[in-house]
Image: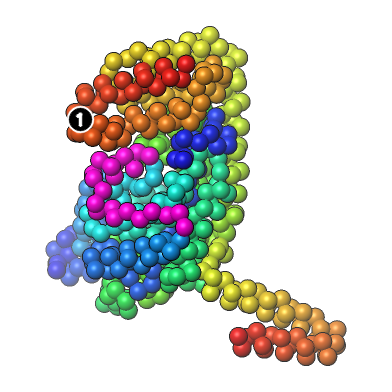
Amino acid sequence: MKCTRCHAKEATVFYREIINGKETKYALCNDCANEVEKENNSFFADPLGGNLLGSLFAGVAPKIQQKKAEKKCSLCGATFRQLAENGKVGCPACYTSFREELAPTLKRLHGAAVHRGRAPEKFQAKRTAMEKIAELESALKKAIEAEEYEKAAQLRDQIRDLRAQ
Amino acid sequence: MYWYETEGTDRDVFVSTRVRLARNLVDYPFEPRLDQTGAKEIIEKVRAVFAAEQGYTFTDFSKVTENEKLSLVEKHLVSPEFARKNTPCAMIENDEKQVYIMVCEEDHLRIQCIRGGFDPKGAMEAALKADAAIDAKLHVAFDEELGYLTHCPTNLGTGLRISVMMFLPALTATGRIKSIQGQLSKIGLTVRGTTGEGSAAKGCLYQFSNCVTQGATEEEILNNLRQATGTIAQAERETRQQLLENNEDLLRDRVMRALGTMRSAYMMDTEELYRLYADVRMGIAMEICKNITYSQLDTLLIQCMPATLTAKSKEPLSAPQRDKLRAEQLRTSTQQFG
């Protein structure tokens, strides 16, 4: 498909814009995409500013699309380009399949955040164990510094047992 | 009892509190990749979970009439998107009529609890009880770093959206609501009118919700919303007091005229109803209308919504027929209030 702007080169960047329900599709070559982006910042604007879910992946999408367009989700078969077009993932496994590609969008949405809220019971047990290990490791470090080697050995064994679980 | 039938806490400013948890099952894609077979499997799995729990009722949503679906939307019990679906979906409600689980909405599961007044803790506990039942028997999509995995990345993490519906006539009348709206995004909250994204909220009803769902605990999200809405509530009450001190006669006149119109009108559309509702509700808060409670008025507003009116009449109604029936309902109910 030829670029809809210069009508000369092959289109490599595909972009769908929805404003007030009106949909416009763009197919641009790499050069035109770069020029348009420079000319008009709003073309790949911050989607949250306009609350346009369809362009949620804007900004990161065009560049990654070119490299990763053919990579598919292991469960649902969606490509990252399809995710970028819809602003939504294809299945829960997409978050694993496209972890690297989704990272900039998630950072933009939620900040550099890691989940700190509730977890399913089986994950909660693991999380509790990890917190206990961190606590024991801190105590182990202090014990070594204080040359309390007997106590340090006990702490080391406790950590080993927890890790084994 | 439905949320609007209960008095709840701080009903002078807080109309309702809704907690919504987005949950999904591993091994199933989202729409449009979720086919009918997959959707039916999810529905059957969730149905089986709640069949084993006490106090829940399952409804095949494809068998619910269009009007009944719209009535559920008017009561804020299901989302408009869910009501519009034409693929397999189901609804599970608890006996208290406060927990509503939408199965195969945008996410595989949307667990929602709505309660009257300000009660995020109570709503959260009821939603988490349903969540625990699902967690115990089904494999919920979760990532240790990202949290609960959702169809839209905006819900990722806790999957939690808390929405507090507030009645803010004084802040609306004085224009102070606009400066509040401008500040909300800085603290991770958003506001919209009850009937959409428009700035002019019908009935002076505004819905405040958290934007960010990841990186904070459920308690932190809840406390942030509690703090912000508490400040707004205080500003609303102070402004009401100022309005009453400076314009008491005018306010009394406005409230009693609204009540008078409700008691005598023969035709009424929803636009007018929302205006009168706001005036009378303000009258209850300022103790001008002493014989009406918030729950009576909120129930009346719901009863007079188009689809709920039509559901009651059990036959299709034209807009003028609805306006007539609405006025009739208002006359009857306000006479009963005394």
Badge 1 amino acid? Leu
> Which residue is located at x 21 percent, y 24 percent?
B321
Residue in the foreground of this view, choosing between A157 and B55: B55
> Which residue is located at x 32 percent, y 59 percent?
B104
SS class, disc 1: loop
Q: Is residue B162 visible?
A: yes
User: Mark 1 sits on what residue?
Assistant: B317
Magenta span covers which residues? B54-75
Q: Chain of mark 1?
A: B
Q: Is residue B258 visible?
A: no
**Where residue B16 appears, x then y in whole percent?**
49, 39
**Colour mapping:** rainbow
Res. A12 image quadrant = bottom left
Residue A77, compared with residue A50, is above or below; it is below
**Where residue B257 appears, x then y in whole percent?**
42, 12
Let me know if residue B72 is in the magenta part: yes
